[in-house]
Structure formats: structure tokens, C-alpha cells
Image (cartoon, rainbow, N blue to C red):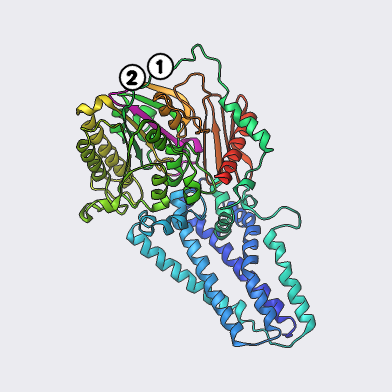
Amino acid sequence: MSANIRPILRILAFFGVYLIIFIILKPIFMAVYLSVMGDISVIDWFRVIAHGLPMDCSMAGYLTIVPALLSLSSVWSSSRCIRIITNVYIALTAAIIAIVAVADLALYGYWNFRLDTTPFFYFFSSPSSALASVSSLIAVVGFLAAAGLAVAIYFIIKKTAAALIVVPNHNIPATIFTLLLTAALIIPIRGSLTVSTMNLSRSYFSANQRLNHAAINPLFSLMYSATHQSDFGSQFRYFDNDDADRIFSGLSMPVETETDSVSPLFSTAHPDIYIIILESFSAHLMPSLGGEPIATGLDSIASTGLLFSNFYASGARTDRAIPAILSAFPAQPTTSLMKFAKKIEHTPSWPKALKELSDYDLSYYYGGDANFTNMLAYLVSSGFDNIVSDKDFPVHMRTSKWGAHDHVVFERAWSDVMEDSSSEKPKLRVIQTSSSHEPFEVPYSDARFSDSPRKNAFAYADRSLKNFVDSLSASPLWQKSIVVITPDHYGVYPEHLDNPLDRHHIPMVITGGALNREPEIITTVADQTAIATTLLSALGLDSSMFIYSRNILDPSVRQYAFFSEPGMAAFVTPTDTVAINLDTDTPIIFSGASPSNAADTCKAILQKIYTNLSEL
């Protein structure tokens, strides 16, 4: 073989081996998740590979840049340093590909989107909490699988591409052709010769979203996510800012109604308020909302107050949900407000407004690590004086992988409530549960759900909730209490809900002895950002700083819900429903009287969110 052509063949070999590895990973992914792929044919397997090929080529191009430069250097030198760097680089890329592939396989079943930076944010904020979702067995198997795959990839590259040794010959033509080929890697990297560059939408080809997801290269997905964690003001630019503001401001225009008055929601001026945030609950757990008889305690509680039947979770993960609930800041599909400590400091919260305007005493209860996802920084900035987390429970009470189980957290909260019962100062108590989360290991066994740890975990969390509310309702404190119950994010039962409306449909309940309304099911369409203005308006406090919030109980306020998750944003009104695939800018759901207007509103809200995010 001519020495002049060896560096060129070496570059092509590296590119080809990386490409083949990515192609092989696709049918492996499909085989693992075949049960949720739906009715697919043999041809669909090849379609996934074909439509994912441009993205695989792009990632192979990125990974080939270093070997190409090393091959170019080898034309002029055979130094030992070049060989060492080559071996280290092969080992590093093999490890990265293996870790990303295994992590992606493990997490997709939980999250239903390909790997992004979210798990790394979770891991570095609290490693123990990040790993709590998986069992020890799965963690060990995953580690061994990643290690085995990394070793296999390393030796494959070493025995193929790296085996093509470049002989130094100081040849000018070889140098020029090698340099040109290295520069030509920009073509697969960009994916085209036009202004359009490679992005996630290039892999979308089917109405079956699982097939689209299967076509995505997980390493490219991770890299794409990592490069979109800044410069938020340039993302999701659908309109001129003035036009986006005009569309958004239309949501605050009053609607015609027979009455513009709102009856008092509370029977006392400054009730004690209990916000209970339920991990992963959904409407599908409640019989009164057409679900299964699993959360029967919540169903019973709902019958004593207001049950909002057309209520939606703002986002997909807890770190997106807490700012939506406590700051009325909608969840973002590509990032999390709580990642950014400086932005957190400039984010208003209605608990802080209660503290400053009505001298409320604030406490937050969570059985896990409060540092997880920067939660502690957010809560402190939101005015919470007393934050109870895992470190505040004895070691023998921290028997959950997430820390203290739900019944322990509720018991601690109840103990503190009774201890402070003589205080005249109004109180806000937020209790966040965690036991109804993977791996669904709880100190409770319901014979009805012996075959389903997931259902059993929800039944346990539901029972813990009911015991707390029963204790409160049986005490003299009930008459001055308001209890607001909402899940944190979209539900994880049933599994693999493809319809985003079904995923995000959650219950919201307002009850308590200080509630000045008869029990009722309220059909108003809303999402978690509405909680802020609904409560502040009932207390006669200003809520104008919460621009995404509105009073659910005011008949003159427009009804709508906006929610998002990675790759999707949706806007729902009583007459229109739109869900948009953000990777392809195409509708997933497009129905109603004016779906085009609804789609524009959805996009305007999303643009407004990212504009605000850039300004915080």
C-alpha cells in the first residue's frame, strides 16, 4: 500500500468504524424497547437506520477530527507522543460512547426522550439522589455493561482504524490531500452545504415518535443539549419580540361573562396554607377523574373541596415543576431554571410575597437531599426560613433511596405543626413527597397491587397523604387551614403514555376548613403556574409580577394551559388543543376551532419564556 494514501485511508477508517458503531447501537436500542415501539414492520428497522444515518455521520465526523489531525502529524513524525495520544483518544471516545449508550438505554424507559444534560445536572448536584432512581442490581449491571462495551469498542478501533500505521515520508501531496480530507469532515458534521446545520429534526420521519427517537444518535443529542444551555434569548425565535409580546398580552384580555365578581375563596384573612407536592401522581390514579382506584385517599380528600379536573403539569421533572408551582415560571423544554443560581436569585416567588406582604412563616419539608438540582438555593431565595431535608432525620429513618419515606416526612411536618399551634403568625408549610418514584420501594404492601410495585408505591404515598390530612382535619387547626395538593410533574402511571395531554393531566385539589366554597369539580382549563395568582388573589395580595399566572376562579380570565417537556410544547384551551414537536416545528396534535391561532400562542409563550430566562 502506498505510504501517500495511508493517512487518507486511516481517516476514512476511523470515520467508518465510528459510523458502524453508531449504526449497530440503533437496533440494540429498538430491541430493548421493542415492547413500547408499537406495531412496527421489518422495514421500520431499516428506516430508523437510514434516517438516523446523517446524524450518525455528523457524530462520526466530530469524533474523527482528532484522529485526522494526528494522521496529518504522522506524515511528518513518528514520535511516540502521537501514538500515546492516539491510544488515549481511542480509550476516551470508547468510554464516552459506551457510557452514553448505556445511560441512554437505562434512562429512556423512565423519561421517554433521548439523553440530554439533565442526568448530569442531577448527578453533580447530588450523586446519591441521582442514583436513587435505579436499583443496586441495575446500577451494577449498567456499570459492567458500559465497561464491557467500552473495552469492546476500544479493541475494535485498535484492530481496524488504528492498525493502519502512517509512515512518515514528509510528502507534500500526502499532506495536502490529508489536510483537505480533514477539512472535508465539516460536510458530514454540518449535514449539508447550505445554511442549515445538523439538528435533532433530521432524524424525524414517522408518525410513531418512538421510531423517531430510535433514529436519534444519543451522543449527538447530549452534545446538542449541552450547547443550548446559554444564549436563551436566541432560542425559539418565532416572531419579532413585539409580535410575541402582542400575542402573549392577548392572554390577559378579559372575556365577557355574566359576572366579573369572584366570591371570597377563604373564610379568614390569613389562613395557614399547606402545599403538598406529590411525586409523579397523575389523574389516571383517581376514580373521580376517570382513573383507576389507586389514589383513593386523594379522591376522598378531593370530595371535601375543589377538584380541578382539567389541570396540567407544567413540565416533566421536579426541577422544572417547583418553579412552576412556587414561582409561576413555566417549565422549559431544553433546560431548567434551577440550574442557574444567579437567575434563581432574581426569580420572584409567591411564598416570598406572602412573607413580605403578610408576614407568613415559611417551612419546607422534603425527605431527600435539598441540594439536589439546586433546590436549596431556590428555596432560600424564595424566602423559606426552615428547610427540613434528609439530614434532619435520624439515620434509621432514612430507609428510602431518596432519604426519608413519605410517612416519616408527613409525621415530622405534623409534629412541627402541633408544636407551633399556639403561634398567631400565619404559616405556609410545603411538603414534597418522594416515595412514589423509581425504584418504587416503600414500607407498605397493598394486597390489591402485589403484582405492581409502581401501583403499590402510589397507594403508599396516597395513604401517607390521607393520614396527614385526616390528622389536620381532626384538629382545631382545620378551621383556619387551606390545603392545596398538586403533583410535581407529569405522571408516571400508566407507563408509556404517548399522548402528551394524557401524560400531563394531573389533579389539583384545594380543601380545608377555611375554604369558603362548597365541594365542587371545577372544569376550568389551567396549569400549575395558575396557583400563584389564584392564592394571592384570594388573600387580596398583588400578583402582577407573575406574568404567566392567572386566577383560575375568576370567570373573566381566559382559560388555558401551557406545558412542555423535552422536544414538545403544548397549549390547551376549552376549544383548541395544540402540541408542537419542537425539534421539527410540526404539530403532534392540532385540533379545535382555531388551532393555528393556538399554535401561534403556544410559540409566543415559549419565546417569551426564553426571553425572560435570558433577562433574569
Q: Which residues are magenta?
A: 496-516
Q: Position of residue 154 (x, y in %)?
A: 52, 75
Q: Position of residue 264 (x, y in %)?
A: 38, 18
Element assignment for label 2: loop
In the depicted structure, whether residue 97 falls above or below residue 282: below
Residue 159 visible within the image: no
Q: Is residue 389 visible?
A: yes
Q: Is residue 498 left or right of residue 474?
A: right
Which comes sooner in the sequence, label 1 or label 2?
Answer: 1
Q: Quadrant of the N terminus?
A: bottom right
Query: Does the magenta segment cover residue 507?
Result: yes
Kindly identify which residue carries mark 2.
516
Can you tell which mark lies on residue 249?
none
Q: Amino acid at mark 2?
A: Asn
Q: Pointer 1: what residue?
A: 263
Question: In terms of depth relative to the viewer, which is nearer, 380 or 280?
Answer: 380
CB under 8 Å between discs 1 and 2? yes
Report how far apart the C-alphas of labels 1 and 2 lie in the structure.
8 Å
From the viewer's perspective, is 498 left or right of 518?
right
Residue 207, image x, y percentages: 59, 43
Residue at 24%, 27% (x, y): give it.
478
Q: Position of residue 397 (x, y in %)?
A: 22, 52
